[in-house]
Image (spheres, rainbow, N blue to C red):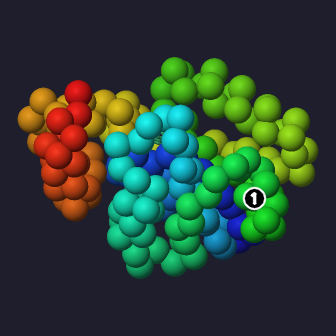
Amino acid sequence: MCQAAIYPGTFDPVTNGHIDIIKRAQEIFSEVIVAVAHNPHKKPLFSVKERAGFLKKATAGLKGVEVVDFDGLVVDFARKHKAKVLIRGLRMLSDFEYEFQMALTNRKFASDVETIFLMPHESYSYLSAKLLKEAVSLGADVSCFVPDFVQKALKEKLREKKWK
Ligand code: ADP
């Protein structure tokens, strides 16, 4: 087993694709810290407390998985937790350019922290939280893509915010 790894993201909200990556990371690392970024510039639909709460519920029972929210540079968060690995999920080629840029920028900031990419099961390889929000706002049933409690929260929040 390897040491601790950080899986950072916005998780607005957590999807089965994120959960798939967490489970894969958990098979490799003794500790997986899911780091929920505040990311106010992304104007998340859910508060950081709500997003972290969904993740805690979704990962309850997964050994070695912890959920923590953070603000600031992810490499600083990693160092604070003595983790040398950042996990990111890679879906299609479309993720590659952004993820590549981010991984190399983070390496420039902290050469002792390595980014490792994991691919989800192919059934989640096209799944994005953004698309799910759009689909739910149009009345779609997304129960095959998110835990039931997330689908319920999405419906309530979108109704409340009249999100488009
Ligand atoms: P960010 O805002 O940091 O890009 P996201 O919450 O969108 O955060 O995603 C966190 C990480 O999970 C990213 O590496 C992203 O590529 C990955 N990811 C998102 N959706 C999926 C999915 N369906 N399958 C696998 N990885 C995913």
Q: Residue at x 31, y 30 (%)?
A: 131
Which quadrant is the N terminus positioned in?
Answer: bottom right
> What's the amino acid at mark 1?
Ala
From the top left corner, tell me how far across and down residue 163 is, in percent. Answer: 23, 34
For the point 46% across and 56% down, which residue is it? 48
Can residue 19 be seen here? The reply is no
Q: Which residue is depicted at the point 60% across and 44% down? A: 88
Which one is nearer the viewer's eye here, 69 or 89? 69
Q: Residue furthest left?
A: 139
Reply above or below: 46 against 95: below
- In this rendering, the count of numbered labels is 1
Is 142 in front, or is 12?
A: 12
Residue at 53 percent of width and 35 percent of height:
41
Q: What secondary structure is found at the residue carrying circle 1? A: helix
Q: Is residue 135 left or right of residue 47?
A: left
Residue 7 pos. (x, y %): 60, 54
Residue 87 lies left or right of residue 161; in this view the side is right
Percent position of residue 100, x then y: 70, 28
24 or 96, which is in the foreground?
96
Ligand 1 within 8 Å, label 1 CB: no
Residue 43 visible, this orientation: yes
**Which residue is disc 1 drawn over?**
78
- Classify the position of the C terminus by image quarter: top left
Q: Position of residue 110 (x, y in %)?
A: 87, 46
Q: Is disc 1 surrounded by few (<14), some (14 to 19) or many (20+) residues within 10 Å?
A: many
